[in-house]
């Protein structure tokens, strides 16, 4: 019997568990990634070396593989910011997925802001800025007020993002240039900066259009330098049940109003003094090692399998989204001084600690650590669990103390 193929966009560490889940469903795996030496390269049955954002090349490859007789039964972007590519492949091959127009809308922060405002949801004051608008920067700043935030329009990892609490035209121009450079649209956003605790709210619509609450994760940030640096995550959320209920309801309302009927709907929210507000959303599963590693370790939930089954046009059992472990999970990082890494030690000893679930390094000896100006600059991720938060924090602190990273 001929094997069926499942397409996973992206070949990094966060796609490894997806491949494992696809294998358990007796599927062969297609992986597309621009990095020919990515983590999933050797695990793929078919590897396509192509930029995850190159939609036309993906469509061309999809047609080629189909013409070669490969039966592609599903496609998924999870933990990687390529939902538009996913939706385009699905549209081409007539596979279950979110509408391509919705994927484009939510991927562009400016368009998403405009749509939410049109639908009557609270949005910050915002302005889309191109190079031609820099001459009007003073007026734009006065209209927005402080604090304000400069950000990219369609990139991830807080690239080109900085909070300003007072007027600094020179630095603002610098950040706008970065934000425009990392945005595929070539534009940036200047918007009112909401303040409060931040959360990831992960949800999914099944093949019948039913809304499912997956999880809420607390995100811990350091904004003291103006840059939004995510220090770690807490799973499950420590917020009151009533607040979480409000967040889930807001997520469902927005998703339905946008016309989402199938697949993931992931939100970045902030708990302001006026209640929960949506900062961004996407139609893929979360990144940051959240649903792939932290959530399964702390709760046993398998959101990845639920998403794969949905992409296969199959129902998934409710048990996949049940907390069977009832532990508290945390992620943390080590922040060595920027410079060239000359030595890393203690990793194996840290991994051997009870409660340490995973340690992932994004850098190795010989790599250069840049200044911490966005979340992509983190050297490593440590994931721990404990019977309660105090237990987990003690384990995380021990692991961070054992690992040594020397830079020059």
Image (spheres, grey):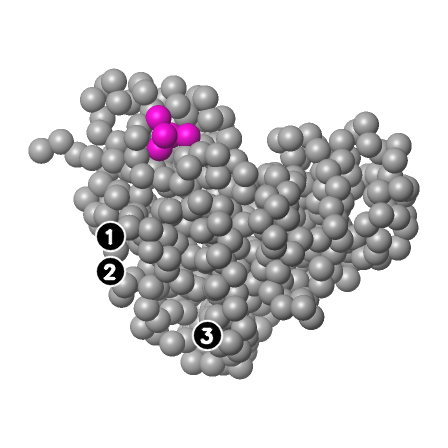
For the image, the number of numbered tags is 3
How far across and down, in percent of the image, does residue 160 sit?
71, 43
Task: Name the dominant secondary structure of the magenta segment.
Answer: helix
Where does label 3 land, which residue? 328
- Mark 1 to mark 2 CA distance (whole Å): 7 Å
Q: What element carries label 2?
A: loop
**329 or 312, nearer to the observer:** 312
Residue 73, horizontal then vertical, whole percent: 25, 35
- Distance from disc 1 to disc 3, alpha carbons, whole Å, reads 29 Å
Mark in the foreground, 1 or 3? 1
Q: Nearer the viewer, residue 350 or 285?
A: 285
Q: Judge whether residue 10 can be spotted in this image.
A: no
The residue labelled by disc 2 is 317
In the displayed structure image, the side of residue 265 where residue 192 appears, left or right = right
Residues drawn in magenta: 88-92
Instruction: Classify 83 as above or below 393.
Output: above
- Mark 3 falls on what kind of element? strand
Using a 10 Å C-alpha cutoff, classify the residue at mark 2 as few (fewer than 14 neighbours), some (14 to 19) or many (20 or more).
Answer: few
Q: Mark 1 points at which residue?
A: 315
């Amino acid at each position: 019997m001929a094997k069926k193929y499942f397409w996973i966009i992206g070949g990094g560490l966060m796609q490894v568990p997806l491949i494992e889940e696809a294998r358990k469903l007796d599927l062969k795996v297609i992986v597309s990634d621009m990095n020919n030496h990515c983590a999933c390269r050797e695990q793929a049955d078919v590897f396509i070396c192509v930029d995850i954002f190159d939609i036309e090349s993906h469509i061309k490859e999809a047609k080629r593989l189909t013409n070669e007789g490969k039966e592609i039964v599903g496609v998924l972007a999870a933990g990687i910011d390529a939902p538009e590519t996913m939706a385009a492949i699905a549209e081409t091959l007539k596979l279950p997925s979110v509408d391509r127009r919705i994927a484009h809308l939510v991927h562009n922060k400016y368009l998403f802001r405009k749509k939410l405002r049109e639908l009557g949801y609270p949005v910050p004051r915002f302005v889309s800025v191109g190079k031609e608008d820099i001459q009007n920067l003073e007026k734009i700043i006065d209209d927005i007020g402080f604090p304000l935030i400069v950000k990219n329009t369609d990139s991830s990892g807080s690239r080109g993002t900085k909070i300003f609490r007072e007027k600094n035209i020179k630095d603002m121009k610098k950040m706008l240039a970065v934000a425009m450079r990392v945005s595929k649209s070539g534009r940036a956003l200047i918007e009112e900066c909401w303040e409060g605790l931040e959360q990831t709210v992960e949800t999914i619509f099944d093949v019948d259009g039913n809304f499912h609450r997956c999880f809420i994760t607390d995100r811990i940030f350091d904004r003291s330098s103006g840059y939004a640096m995510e220090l770690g995550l807490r799973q499950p959320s420590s917020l009151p049940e009533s607040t979480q209920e409000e967040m889930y309801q807001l997520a469902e309302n927005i998703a339905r109003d946008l016309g989402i009927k199938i697949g993931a709907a992931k939100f970045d929210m902030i708990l302001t003094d006026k209640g929960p507000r949506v900062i961004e959303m996407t139609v893929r599963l979360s990144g940051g090692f959240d649903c792939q590693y932290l959530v399964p370790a702390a709760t046993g939930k398998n959101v990845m399998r639920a998403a794969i089954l949905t992409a296969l046009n199959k129902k998934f059992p409710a048990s996949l989204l049940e907390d069977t472990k009832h532990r508290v999970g945390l992620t943390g990082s080590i922040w060595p001084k920027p410079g060239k890494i000359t030595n890393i030690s203690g990793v194996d000893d840290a991994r051997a600690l009870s409660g340490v679930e995973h340690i992932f390094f994004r850098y190795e000896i010989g790599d250069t650590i840049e200044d911490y100006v966005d979340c992509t600059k983190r050297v490593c991720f440590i994931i721990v669990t404990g019977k309660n938060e105090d237990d987990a924090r003690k384990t995380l602190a021990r692991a961070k103390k054992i690992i040594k990273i020397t830079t020059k």
